[in-house]
């Protein structure tokens, strides 16, 4: 059963600095939704709100998982992960002095994922052959593209229902960006995931997005229900295409 995420009227910030203003968006079951925007407009802050790393000052964040509704505001990050929500942060945030396999095993921290460790580990090595080849290599000695593969695979080890991915293209060469985006779609389809992806690379994001939102200065200024709608929007063209 696919899961969903509904964010309603979220305000958030850091101390006196307000970053998000009344942000609302929906990720329907089985969708990949792109949260589009340039740096500094609140994408990462919204992701952190969903994961319990930043507490909103207003609004609600509701996840429906396996038929049950869960209000995420007020829950700890551990409790949110335990529900089946995984996060691939910007910059990967791996354990650089641990091996590929050790990083992957740490991704299976969630109690319900531990019974599937062997199966998920085998799948990750099949989905990312390069990781299989470098099982004993330290994560910090890998290339940016390899580290991004490892970050995605580590998130899958938690056996998630909802996957949040923050800026998967950052620091990668264009060819690797394309391959990473394609892999996200492949993994979403294989695991029947619901995906919210924050991305500033508009051209790549809409290749796999079922819908998208444009966030500017902490506010949603456009919602597109399809890649075509995103392409045709004047604000999108202005921000990304310079037209």
Image (cartoon, helix red, strand yellow):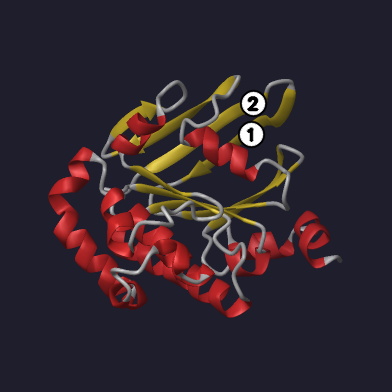
Q: Identify the residue at image location x=26%, y=74%.
A: 126
State the image coordinates of residue 179 (x, y, percent, origin top left): 49, 75
In the displayed structure, 207 sits above or below 34; it is: below
Q: Nearer the viewer, residue 176 or 204?
A: 176
Q: Residues within 10 Å of mark 1 (few under 14, many from 20)?
A: many
Give the quadrant of the C terminus. bottom right
Instruction: Say if residue 68 shows up in the picture.
Output: yes
Q: Which mark is residue 153?
A: none
Mark 2, secondary structure of its residue: strand
x, y percent for residue 37: 70, 51
Please determine whether, in this image, residue 78 is positioned above or below residue 146: above
Residue 204 placement (x, y as % from top left): 60, 69
In the picture, measured across the screen, residue 57 lies left or right of residue 138, that is right
**Alpha-carbon neighbours of circle 2 within 10 Å: few (<14), some, or many (≥20)?**
many
- Which residue is labeled 2 in the image? 11
Residue 159 in view, yes or no: no
Instruction: Identify the element where label 1 is drawn.
Output: strand
Q: On the rendered structure, is 137 left or right of 144? A: left
Residue drawn where x is 41% and y is 63% of the image: 139
Distance from Cα at disc 1 to Cα at disc 2: 7 Å
Q: Earlier in the sequence, mark 1 or mark 2?
A: 2
Give the x, y percent position of residue 212. 60, 53
Q: Is residue 85 above or below residue 134?
A: above
Residue 77 sits above or below residue 34 on the image: above
- State the residue position of label 1: 23
Q: Please identify, in this view, whether the residue under mark 1 or under mark 2 is nearer the observer.
A: 2
Given contact means CB atoms under 8 Å apart, are the residues at marks 1 and 2 in contact? yes
């Amino acid at each position: 059963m696919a899961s969903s995420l509904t964010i309603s009227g979220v305000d958030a910030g850091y101390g006196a600095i307000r970053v998000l203003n009344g942000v609302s968006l929906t990720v329907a079951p089985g969708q990949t939704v792109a949260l589009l925007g340039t740096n500094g407009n609140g994408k990462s802050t919204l992701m952190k709100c969903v994961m319990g790393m930043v507490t909103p000052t207003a609004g609600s964040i509701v996840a429906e998982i396996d038929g049950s509704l869960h209000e995420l505001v007020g829950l700890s990050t551990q409790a949110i992960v335990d529900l089946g929500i995984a996060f691939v942060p910007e910059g990967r945030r791996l354990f650089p002095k641990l091996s590929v396999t050790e990083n992957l095993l740490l991704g299976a921290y969630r109690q319900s994922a531990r019974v599937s460790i062997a199966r998920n580990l085998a799948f990750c090595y099949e989905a990312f052959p390069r990781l299989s080849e470098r099982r004993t290599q330290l994560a910090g000695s890998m290339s940016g593209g390899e580290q991004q593969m490892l970050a995605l695979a580590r998130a899958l080890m938690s056996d998630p229902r909802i996957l949040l991915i923050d800026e998967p293209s950052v620091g990668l060469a264009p060819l690797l960006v394309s391959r990473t985006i394609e892999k996200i779609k492949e993994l979403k389809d294989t695991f029947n995931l619901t995906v919210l992806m924050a991305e500033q690379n508009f051209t790549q994001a809409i290749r796999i997005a079922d819908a998208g939102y444009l966030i500017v200065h902490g506010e949603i200024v456009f919602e597109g229900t399809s890649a075509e709608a995103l392409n045709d929007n004047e604000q999108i063209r202005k921000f990304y295409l310079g037209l």
